[in-house]
Amino acid sequence: MEDRNAANLASRSTGSGGQTTGTRAMGDPSTWVDEHGDALFRYALLRIRERASAEDVVQETFLAAVKSKNEFQGNSEVRTWLIGILRHKIGDYFRKNGREVQVDSNPDDADPVIDSWFNKKGFWIKPPKTWDVNPAELAERQEFWLVLQGCMDALPGRAGEAFSLRVVDDIEAGEVCKVLGITTTNLWVLLHRARARLRACLEEKWFGRQTKESA
Amino acid sequence: MMLNCKDATRLISEGLDHRLSIWQRINLRLHVMMCKACNAYKRQIEGLQRVFVLLRQRGKGVVPDMSSDAHRLSPVKREQIKHLLESQTRVDPTDRL
Ligand SMILES: [Zn+2]
């Protein structure tokens, strides 16, 4: 019953109207785990930060989804629908464990961390160092990936979620907005915050080190 | 109207997410031409975006050795969920409604 509600809410929050004869097929549930399992797990891990619990929540999500698959409305991607259910399950998990559901800064508010990089007139106090990104080279380097991962883990709440869904998992902007319940403008703000912090983190943890080593 | 650096960094990011207006593009281009710091910032942000595209291409939607398996479901859990789903689909619970 509880599962059913979660899925119901999730499908409702992903848009109104639409019949089961939607434009998108939901595929065979037996393929869900391989197709979406890792993406759901990463999302859960981002919020819960503990492996075993994140896996359990993903399992509950799939079970709730298969029970209420008739409520899938086809006006969003299967993955978005699943993430909608997952978010409810994560909320349940936090409530059960007495952890506060994470309410972080509103995208409409100022971001004190980013604000602190600029003076009153909006010019850099501590300008970026000049280092160049060589994407092809970096993408090949396992150590870089580990540092990047550490920096992504440090992203705050919704900025981290937005970045992970949009940039890491390449989910369409409209779908990400539906899942997070935010406007497109909010999404741009969150992505900006995520990128700005990632850049600063990498400057400190990777590029700073590189230039010191080569100096 | 001249952009300050704070606005410029915001537009640099937004430029990756949607097409900026003609005035935003002109103002941003002027600022980045004259401001060394934002010029560096822009190359770094765009380079990072490219890194993620490359990582995705290699990993077919799943950032690759993103794994080190730390960011993927464990094989045991994966099988467990599959079994559970299978047993669920065999008895369609909606039949009981
Ligand atoms: Zn500037």
Image (cartoon, rainbow, N blue to C red):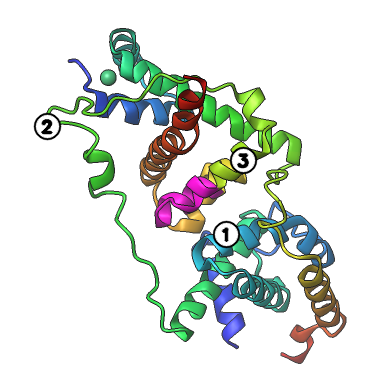
Task: Report the residue marked by disc 3.
Answer: A145
- Mark closest to the chain's N terminus, 2 or 1: 1
Residue type indicated by callout 1: Tyr
Chain letter of disc 1 in the image: A
Residue B12: where, in percent of width, then height? 39, 25
Q: Which mark is residue A120?
A: 2
Residue A28: where, in percent of width, then height? 82, 63
* Element under disc 2: loop
Task: Report the residue marked by disc 1.
Answer: A43
Q: Nearer the viewer, residue A73 or A49?
A: A49
* Element under disc 1: helix
Instruction: Tell me if residue A85 is in the magenta stretch.
Output: no
- Mark closest to the chain's N terminus, 2 or 3: 2
Chain letter of disc 3 in the image: A
Which quadrant does ligand 1 occupy?
top left
Residue type indicated by callout 2: Lys
